[in-house]
Image (cartoon, helix red, strand yellow):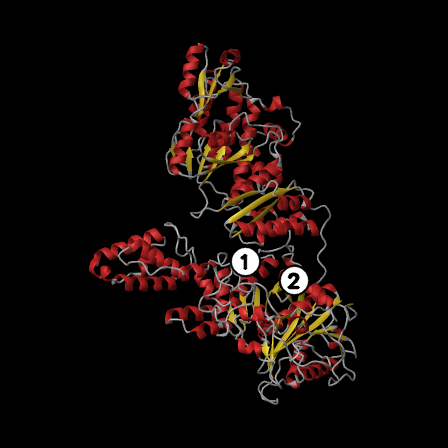
Amino acid sequence: MTRDRSLDIAVTGVFGRFPGSADLAAWWEALVEGRVLTTRYDERRLREAGVPQSLIDDPEFVPVHGHLDDADRFENALFRVSPREAEMMDPQHRMMLECAWAALEDAGTSPLGTPLTTGVYASASGSGYLRAMLAGGGLDPITLEDAIHGNEPDFMASLISYKLNLTGPAVAVQTACSSSLVALHTAVQALLNGECDQALVVGAGVAYPQAGHLHVAGGIHSAAGACRPFDEHADGVVAGSGVACVVLRRLADALADGVEPYGVVLGTAVNNDGSAKAGYYAPSAGGQEAVIRAALDAADVDGASIGYLETHGTGTRVGDPIEWSAASSALRAAGAAPGQVAVGALKANTGHLDNAAGLAGLIKALFVVREGIVPPVAGFTRLNPLLDTEDSPLYVPSAMAPWSGPEPRRAGVSSFGVGGTNAHAVVEAPPAPAPRPDGRDQSRAGHLALLSAADGEALARSADRLGRHLAAHAPAPADVTHTLATGRAALPERLAVVGDDTADLAHRLTAGAGVVRGRVPETGPAPLVFAFPGQGSQRPGMALPFAETLPGFAEALADCLGAFEPGLAAEVERAMHDPAFPEEELARTRLAQPALFAVEYAVAVALRGLGLVPQAVIGHSLGEITAACVAGVLELADAARFVALRGRAMQDCPEGAMLVLGCGEDATRELLAAGGLPLEVAAVNATDNTVVAGPPEAVAEFETWLAGRVATHRLRTTRAFHSALVEPSVPLLTAALPETSVHAPAVAWAVNDGRLLLPGTEVAADSFASAARNPVRFAGALDALARHLPGALIVEAGPGRALSAIAEAADLTAVPLAAGRIARAEDVLAALGALWTVGQPLAADRLYAGGRPVRLPGYSFEGPRRTAPEAAPPSDTRGRVAGAPGPTTPQAESTGSRQAQAAAPDPADVPALVAGLWAELLGHQEITADADFFALGGDSLLVTRLARRLGAALGVQTPIRDLLLARTLARQTEVVAALAAKAPVAAGAG
């Protein structure tokens, strides 16, 4: 009978930080090898941690702990947390934020932009960090309130939801050691009840300080400093520190989105022992057995299908026999055969991770069923004789072995909390991934990889890690680019690189070859301008790079071709898609103009579909008509018809030539006067770029005469546009315009007479005819654009880079989409990447519809060390216990400088007063006048404290609303200075 899989839950992402392991791969390797990962501290490290000398000298003190390196580091800038707030926050909460971020990335979900309603179910151990701050006695009431918000478990789930913009339930779950597995059960129920579409379950157990324990006779802690579950030498538990997180989704939803799960949660259950046990701290065999049976029932599987059990496994004399008996009884009654189920006990490796223990055990079980490898119980020698082994389904593996249990591979996970709250989960190996067709990536010419981080150093680390991962594992490039585009947050510091395949991407990322880096401006992305080139930029096959890279381009091009007469449309289509099409034929005006218009229009439509929406448009000569169409001045059918007529009419004009001079308009006119030839100024593109036009022989003679006087360049055209030679076309164009609908522009439109037409401006229809004859004053149009949109970014939406060069010469920023003489898809992708690196809202996910999520390295967390002065170990290490072991006292960079501050500034010096309070409250020491209070990690509560401190210093009431509106240091200083001026006596009194 087939199981109903509609209630199955996929584990789509995992992350953990565990003792003795750099990452999960190293952790799993250590488990498979059966290594003990706890640390025995020497006296120096204990003293540095702030452990009293009297405790160090106590013969019953056991200096062993599952030590978590760098527990005091935090990427606070990534989470928009000020240095001071970061110091006051429990390291557990900090690491839970980082762990949640990394797990979401591992699940292929953007931590800041998931479209899924995501719930957060979090648990953490009691805050030794808060106790250390309280023990110092230096917390005033307001600082104490900050400390409570940053340390108490009530606030951790909602903090994660707030910082990651997650809108599902945010629930703190606290049941002592079983907390995180109970949180898993709660999350599973929420998914099945439809309360969320994705659930983040995170648990932390990090001691402060990480030091060891005092052995008490009859207690649960090991005198030997080794946790040996189910072993004859078991004498108790050893504590450890760790953080773990999993991401859950309904299995059907995950598979529909192409996610490959780590495994599947088939069922969970929780209960409590009640009072049917020897005491509150004692376990109950009946409660443990009942919860295992309930989980099997919820999973709709029997004991005969279970091949592995990750136990609670504390290694205590009382706990081990009770757990062994309960699990044996439950599995045997459910059909498990003697010796069928391998036992796991993670605490033997890492120590007891407290509130994170249940999730850590779950992750281990998922790896077991996914990899088909059963690790040994670390340090196991011989079975505890107190365990009832008669007909027991359980056995303790003493060496790594391949899976030998039933198929599909299934495992149970137990976690039991002090007080009797029991939890059990049943998991199964992930389903086989859906097959993918071979050669799926060969159709794409180039792959665009996008990376971002909160700072440049993190970005460099991430690029190197990703490059090494790609070289080692060679995932499909479409999956890589899709995952980076859809499963990562878009952060300010950015990088883009294009590669032919995965190996090329790997090389470029590690070597930095061809990598484009940029940063999103603090004021937001620059205003975008589309620029459309004129005749001369056409090339055979010019549509190919856009068709290969831009979604929606082919459809828009088809719409445009449909507006042409069928014969012309067929010829244009061949010229645009065939690189071997005769170049001289395409240069003919009747074909070049409609071909260029069609490509430019389709590019503009495709760019809009990618989220790149212009605030203004500009075109050169023919490109002005494309700009008018994109701006909504001309409808597509009318514009296409007019362009076709324009091309034919100009083709019928006398032959001509055009010559670019490297000088301005005045100098050009002087040269024309001196040369005495029948030539005209046809275009003024820049202060050193003017175009003249006229009869071919006159242009040739003028070019020869100019030799050595000024740089020249002949344009690829057979007509003298914007000169008297094209006047015969003007009446034909004028006669066609009454049939053309002309509208006011919807966006700003820079026209070739040098004006900027704002939205709503009336446009004269006959201007399109006269523009064919009048000179192009492109330089004036650019100037008008620059004045209207300071700092604008110009995208050349067509082949070539002629307009980009002109814009750059005018000190404007320009990005050509297809700059090369031979157009390549890689150039278009690189241009899109360059736009993304400077903050343009590129909808990169639309570029990779064929990819699916794949496991890639996530954010590189190496934040600064943050320890509040109130919690740091005192210099006299015989004092209170507070701190973290390490080679140096883990002080925050900002702490020392803040402690070294001079006395408070004179209240009469308002700028110094405001700046000093900002530095104190936020923890930043170098603050510029335009710094934003909230961007530096401030919030409304901190503004309230700022107002209170300012009021106390100045003797005037400082309105909180005014400070909220005046976000920058300079503006807040202005507000405070105005208040101080109204009360000079009070301010002077200080």
> Which amino acid, by three-letter code, is at mark 1?
Pro
What x and y, as percent, mark residue 780? 40, 28
Instruction: Note whether 651 is above or below 139 in the view shown.
Output: above
The residue shown at (37%, 69%) is 142
What x and y, as percent, mark residue 470? 67, 50
Q: Image quadrant of residue 243? A: bottom right
* Residue 961 shows in this picture: yes
Instruction: Note whether 386 is above or below 38 in the view shown.
Output: below
The residue shown at (35%, 55%) is 915
Residue under label 2 = 24
Give whichever of discs 1 and 2 has the lower sequence position. 2
* Residue 248 shows in this picture: no
> Which amino acid, by three-letter code, is at mark 2?
Leu
Horizontal side, residue 768 vs residue 446: left or right: left
Numbered badge on residue 238:
none
Is label 1 or label 2 in front? 2
Horizontal side, residue 910 vs residue 490: left or right: left
What x and y, as percent, mark residue 329? 72, 83
Residue under label 1 = 111
C-alpha span from label 1 to label 2: 20 Å
The quarter of the image holding the N terminus is: bottom right
The quarter of the image holding the C terminus is: bottom left
Label 1: how many Cα within 10 Å (few below 14, some 14–19, many 20+): many
Which residue is outermost to the top?
Answer: 676
Give 709 or 590, whichever is nearer the viewer: 709
Helix, strand or loop under label 2? helix
Helix, strand or loop under label 1? loop
Horizontal side, residue 270 vs residue 698: left or right: right
